[in-house]
Every structure is written in structure tokens, then in C-alpha cells.
Image: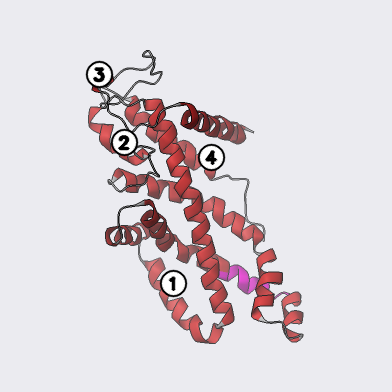
């Protein structure tokens, strides 16, 4: 109940803020470092005169726009690779197992930063970096579940009647993997949120369109002026924590 209430209030506030507040892409030095409850700025402003409430709403909105697609693409890519191993098991299984072992041995953040360094600084690169850093873990989970499904009498019967791999994937594996997909999606969202916040803090562009700076960038920009505008630092931290709490629902557990 409390979890859902937090979700409704948080996402409702973000939606209203994005609709009614101007995007924080401007500079207004005549209204910089205003305290909370200032006229026209209920949560004050940062040192460039940008509305803290607007920064909070647009930063959170931009994060959500990237986090959810990134997690979905990661799971889809992992399932695609898993499906390849089903179609060409004898040819690619050994190669994939070695590649996955190497990917898992590398820190995910290091892998993501390497990709970000190579690719242009834009949201698409962020998405690719997250896929590269997280796909191996999702692949291992899906592979373990598929091995469990393969022992099912339905699979054995289908194979004995000459079912092709594509038939098995569509009619047997996909329906049986629904709970796993749901589990991987919700359990992985908090990690992606934290990764995005760290990228933004390091100066990597994580904003989508004209939505202003990301949450991590807001913290990095205002941390040295905490005494003058504390809410410019506290609000993006609060947004990150609420995003982690709201998106990582404990109600979506994997059913074996």
C-alpha cells in the first residue's frame, strides 16, 4: 500500500511538473540561489537561477525515458542470444559460454564506461553501454531457466514429434519464461537507475531532448554550493532514491 502510494505521488508529481513547468534549460542569474518558498519558486533555485522543482521533475522524467527502454532492450538482447544457442547449440554453446564468462568477470561499470568512451556522447550510446554491461547476467538467468524448461515432458514430447526450434521457442519457451522476464525487468531497474545517475554525475549526457541536466549532473554541479542552495543537491538525491524504490517493486518476484 505504501509502495503504491509513493509511486502515485512521485510519478504524478513528475507528470504534472513536465506538463506545467518550463524545462530547466535557461539561465536566470537574477534569481539564483533562492531559498525554498520563494515567490514563484516553491523549492528555490540553483546557482544558475533554474527552478529546483523543474530540475527534479525533468531530471526524473529523463531518467525514466532511458531506464525502462534500456532494461527492455537488455532482456530482449539476452533472450536473442539465448535463442541462438538453442538453434545452434553444438556450434555456438562453447563460444558463448566463454564470452559470457569473460563478460561476467569484468565489472559492469567498467564495461559501460569503455563503451561510452568509444561511442559518441548521446542517449543511444547510454542504452548500448547499459546493454553491454548487463546482458550477461540476464543471459545466465535465462539460460538456467531454459535448462529447467528443457526437462519438461511437454518439450520432450514436442521434440519426439519433430518440433523445430522455432516452434519450441514460440509455443513453449516464451510462455514459460514470462515470469522470468518480469522478474529480470523489475529487479534490474534499480541498478540501471544508479548507473544512469553515475554517468550523469561524471558529465556523460543522459538527458533526452531539451529536458535539462540529468540527476547526477545536478548533484555534481551544485555540490560545492550546498551551503547556498542545499535543495539543489538534496532534491536530485531524493529523486534517485525514490526512483530506485518505486521502480524496483518487491511485488514482482520470480515464480519457479
Q: Secondary structure at mark 4?
A: helix
Residue 145 vertical position relative to residue 250 in the rendered view, above or below: below
**Which residue in the protein does label 1 denote?**
100
Q: Earlier in the sequence, mark 4 or mark 2?
A: 2
The residue carrying pointer 3 sits among few (fewer than 14), some (14 to 19) or many (20 or more) residues within 10 Å by Cα, namely few
Element at badge 1?
helix
Q: Quadrant where the N terminus lies?
A: top right
Provide the residue designation for mark 3. 30
State left or right for residue 56 relative to residue 250.
Answer: left
Q: CA distance from mark 1 to mark 3?
A: 54 Å
Instruction: Examine the image and state in which quarter residue 116 appears.
Output: bottom left
Residue 52 occupies quadrant = top left
Please identify the quadrant where the C terminus is shown. bottom right
Instruction: Tell me how far mark 3 sits from mark 2, CA to CA.
Output: 22 Å
Where residue 108 appears, x then y in whole percent? 38, 60
Q: Position of residue 81 (x, y in %)?
A: 51, 72
Amino acid at each position: 500500500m505504501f509502495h503504491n502510494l509513493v509511486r502515485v505521488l512521485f510519478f504524478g508529481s513528475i507528470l504534472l511538473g513536465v506538463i506545467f513547468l518550463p524545462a530547466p534549460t535557461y539561465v536566470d542569474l537574477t534569481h539564483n540561489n533562492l531559498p525554498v518558498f520563494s515567490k514563484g519558486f516553491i523549492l528555490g533555485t540553483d546557482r544558475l537561477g533554474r527552478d529546483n522543482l523543474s530540475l527534479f521533475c525533468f531530471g526524473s522524467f529523463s531518467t525514466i525515458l532511458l531506464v525502462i527502454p534500456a532494461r527492455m532492450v537488455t532482456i530482449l538482447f539476452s533472450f536473442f542470444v539465448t535463442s541462438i544457442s538453442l538453434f545452434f547449440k553444438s556450434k555456438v554453446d562453447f563460444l558463448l559460454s566463454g564470452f559470457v564468462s569473460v563478460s561476467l568477470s569484468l565489472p559492469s561499470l567498467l564495461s559501460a564506461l569503455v563503451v561510452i568512451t568509444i561511442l559518441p556522447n548521446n542517449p543511444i550510446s547510454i542504452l548500448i553501454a547499459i546493454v553491454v554491461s548487463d546482458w550477461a547476467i540476464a543471459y545466465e538467468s535465462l539460460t538456467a531457466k531454459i535448462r529447467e524448461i528443457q526437462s519438461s515432458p511437454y518439450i520432450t514430447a514436442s521434440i519426439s514429434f519433430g518440433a523445430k526450434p522455432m516452434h519450441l521457442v514460440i509455443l513453449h519457451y516464451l510462455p514459460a519464461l514470462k515470469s522470468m522476464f518480469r522478474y529480470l525487468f523489475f529487479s534490474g531497474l534499480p541498478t540501471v537507475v544508479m548507473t544512469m545517475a553515475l554517468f550523469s554525475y561524471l558529465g556523460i549526457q543522459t538527458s533526452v531532448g531539451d529536458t535539462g541536466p540529468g540527476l547526477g549532473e545536478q548533484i555534481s554541479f551544485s555540490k560545492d554550493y550546498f551551503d547556498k542552495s542545499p535543495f539543489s543537491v538534496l532534491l536530485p538525491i531524493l529523486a534517485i532514491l525514490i526512483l530506485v524504490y518505486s521502480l524496483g517493486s518487491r511485488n514482482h518476484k520470480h515464480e519457479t
